[in-house]
Image (spheres, rainbow, N blue to C red):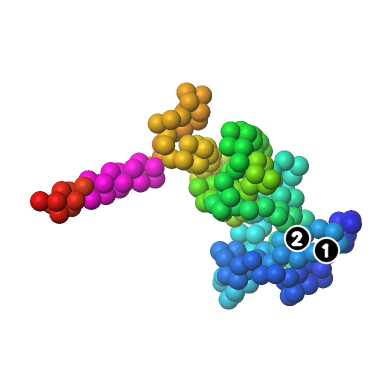
């Protein structure tokens, strides 16, 4: 099959007749179908005029991220955007990390670290790796990253807001990797891994909330035991 086999008509056929993965996600509906010998995932920017406009912009940004990441192992291939509303991506037939933790734990997270570092070198951050459904586990040991809908793409020149967001999500990606690898027991981090961890405001707030909740629950248990 050649790239020319994937055209607007074939993509629209998937949207009309393929399997529906999600009917109303943040970026629209998600469909899966077959073109030639390949399984294709299509994100379709539908909705009222305002929502359709917002979703098209999100899909265009995701397209730019995939274009920068072309050729990186562990990143699905993107076939492009069609009719300014359909984003076509390689469908990776693998369970999510949420439902299928890796069998080869250390090897998996070493490979995941390599993928994160590779996308950062291309000037892209994922930004949503705490969501376990955005990490696929192929054959029990090979990670794939999907859904770059909130990714940042580093811009050249003077763009302070872009730089601020990019730096924040750059660190957030590594923090997410460490939290998954150590199952949130960060006190078990090796010194080498700990060098990649920088607690962010959101981490501090979550930690404070957990400590407060534990204290309140402990106080309630002590009162109930009296």
In percent of width and height, residue 18 lies at 73, 70
Q: Looking at the image, which is closer to me, 74 or 7?
A: 74
Judging from the image, what secondary structure is the residue with disc 1 in?
A: strand
Residue at 88% over, 59% down: 4
Magenta span main SS: helix
For the N terminus, which image quadrant?
bottom right
Magenta residues, as a range?
Answer: 202-217
| Sequence-first tag of 2 and 1 | 1
In percent of width and height, residue 142 lies at 67, 42
Residue at 39% over, 42% down: 203
Left or right relative to 208: residue 79? right
Residue at 70% over, 55% down: 93
| Discs 2, 1 touching: Cβ within 8 Å | yes
Left or right relative to 225: residue 136? right
Asked whether residue 37 appears in the rendered view, the answer is yes
Residue tagged 1: 35
């Amino acid at each position: 099959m050649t790239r020319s086999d994937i055209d607007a008509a074939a993509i629209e056929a998937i949207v009309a007749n393929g399997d529906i993965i999600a009917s109303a996600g943040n970026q629209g509906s998600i469909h899966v179908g077959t073109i030639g010998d390949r399984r294709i995932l299509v994100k379709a920017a539908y909705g009222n005029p305002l929502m359709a406009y917002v979703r098209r912009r999100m899909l265009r940004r995701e397209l730019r991220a995939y274009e920068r990441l072309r050729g990186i192992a562990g990143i699905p291939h993107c076939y492009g955007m069609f009719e300014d509303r359909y984003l076509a991506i390689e469908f990776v037939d693998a369970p999510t990390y949420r439902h299928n933790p890796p069998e080869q734990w250390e090897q998996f997270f070493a490979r995941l670290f390599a993928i994160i570092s590779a996308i950062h070198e291309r000037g892209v951050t994922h930004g949503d790796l705490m969501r376990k459904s955005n990490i696929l586990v192929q054959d029990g040991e090979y990670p794939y990253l999907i859904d770059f809908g909130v990714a940042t793409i580093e811009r050249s020149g003077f763009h302070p807001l872009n730089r601020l967001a990019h730096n924040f999500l750059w660190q957030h990606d590594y923090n997410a990797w460490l939290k998954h690898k150590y199952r949130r027991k960060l006190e078990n981090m090796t010194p080498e891994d700990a060098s990649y961890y920088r607690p962010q405001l959101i981490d501090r707030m979550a930690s404070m909330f957990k400590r407060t909740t534990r204290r309140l629950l402990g106080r309630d248990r002590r009162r109930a035991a009296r």
